[in-house]
Image: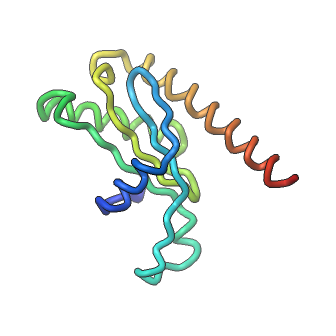
């Protein structure tokens, strides 16, 4: 799983990405930025990347690390990282207090919304 490490790429994704909020996690989704300056090949540009962010508002290091572990597990469960996409998982306050099942259900709903969004865009481009 490749992660987004550049702070400029994360800032760019925060400003231009599509946000989808759940009570537990906010997803910020955007198209994969090309790595032309690094000389990356086309196949490398097509693999997806993710970032897991848990801010200090969430709590101490134990709570933040717990939130990141949950989000990593959810990403794997949801089939991520997704080809050609950059996705940020941003922890919200309730992610550590809720049961894993509740968090997983809300993420499944987000995944369905994203899939329908992709299908709608594909139909629009086909016209």
Residue 94 vs residue 75: left or right? left
Q: How many marks?
A: 0
- Left or right? Give the position of 101 relative to 82: left
Could you tell me residue 50's position as x and y percent? 42, 51
Residue at horizontal 47 percent and vertical 51 percent from the top: 16
Residue furthest to the right: 127
**Residue at (12, 30) in percent of width and height:** 60
In the rendered image, residue 48, in percent from the top left (x then y), is placed at 51, 57
24, above or below 10, in the image: above
- Residue 23 position, x and y percent, is 41, 20
Residue positioned most to the left: 60
- Tell me the quadrant of the picture where the N terminus can be found: bottom left
Above or below, comparing residue 61 to residue 1 in the picture: above
**What residue lies at 53% left-to-right and 62% top-to-bottom?**
47
Q: How is the image coloured?
A: rainbow
Q: Quadrant of residue 85?
A: bottom right
Residue 101 x/y as whole percent: 44, 18
Q: Quadrant of residue 120?
A: top right
């Amino acid at each position: 799983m490749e992660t987004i490490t550049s702070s400029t790429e994360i800032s760019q994704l925060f400003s231009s990405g599509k946000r989808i909020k759940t009570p537990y996690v906010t997803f910020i989704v955007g198209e994969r930025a090309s790595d032309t300056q690094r000389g990356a090949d086309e196949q490398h540009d097509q693999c997806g990347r993710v970032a897991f962010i848990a801010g200090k508002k969430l709590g101490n290091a134990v709570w933040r690390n717990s939130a990141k572990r949950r989000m990593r597990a959810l990403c794997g469960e949801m089939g991520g990282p997704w080809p050609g996409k950059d996705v940020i998982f941003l922890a919200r306050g309730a992610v550590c207090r809720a049961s894993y099942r509740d968090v997983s259900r809300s993420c499944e709903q987000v995944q369905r919304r994203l899939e329908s969004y992709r299908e709608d865009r594909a139909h629009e481009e086909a016209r």
